Image (cartoon, helix red, strand yellow):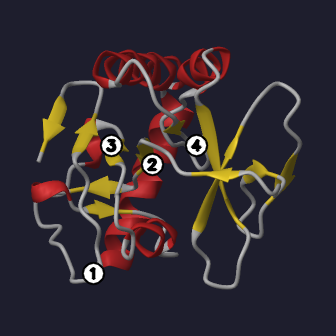
Amino acid sequence: MKEKWRKQYRNQRRLFQETAPNLHKDYSLEIAKKVTQILPDEGLVASYLAFDAEVDLTWLNRALMQQNRLLLPGVHDSYQALHFFHVTEKTAFKTSSHGMQEPKPTDNALWPDVVLVPLVAFGPTGVRLGFGKGHYDRTFSKVEKRPTLIGIGFSMSYCSALTSETHDIPLNMVVTEKRVHTY
């Protein structure tokens, strides 16, 4: 069922970006503004670079970079967990095996206080449907201090039938253009 939903919600998101690009940008900006209102004033924030019609957080990422707080993820080990790297205007990037841009690996991986998690769909209780690779779940499943996990998506990505599985790491919040869901 998850594969069916993954395909359905990704197609819906792509169609939204293709048919209403200005609205997609407006909603992305609205979501970024909502996120700035709930982020703590200090600490490192792991974000992402939009891929496959995800919510575009470019505006927020620039602000976090200017504050010297921006981390971006990369997958650089056989366990396929995420590592988070400090990003500046001089950061070098590479294309991952999934076609996404990520920082080139360095020795200075850092641990975030907050992680902005892109989602394909979300459901009750903070359950998230992602691309299905398991990077986020693997990364946060065996840590002592889990950062605050904030899902980022459009309200159209809500799936009331989506339920959590034992390996799923729940989100603390989900931010859409309409509201902030707290779990």
**4 or 1: tag closer to the N-terminus:** 1
Query: Closer to the N terminus: mark 3 or mark 4?
Result: 4
- Identify the mark at residue 48; answer none if there is no mark: 4
Element type where label 3 sits in the image = strand
Cα gap from disc 4 to disc 1, whole angstroms:
26 Å
Q: Is residue 91 left or right of residue 82?
A: right
Q: Of 6 and 88, which appears nearest the observer?
A: 88
Q: Which residue is mark 2?
A: 118
Q: Quadrant of residue 177?
A: top left
**Which residue has dot 3 on it?**
150
Identify residue for label 1.
1
Q: Residues within 10 Å of mark 2 (few under 14, many from 20)?
A: many
Percent x, y of residue 76:
73, 70
Label 2 or label 3, whichever lies nearer to me, is 3
Q: Amino acid at mark 2?
A: Pro
Can you say whether 167 is above or below 10 in the image?
below
First reached walking from the N terminus: tag 1 or tag 2: 1
Give residue 149's position: percent from left, percent from top.
Answer: 33, 48
Residue type marked 4: Tyr
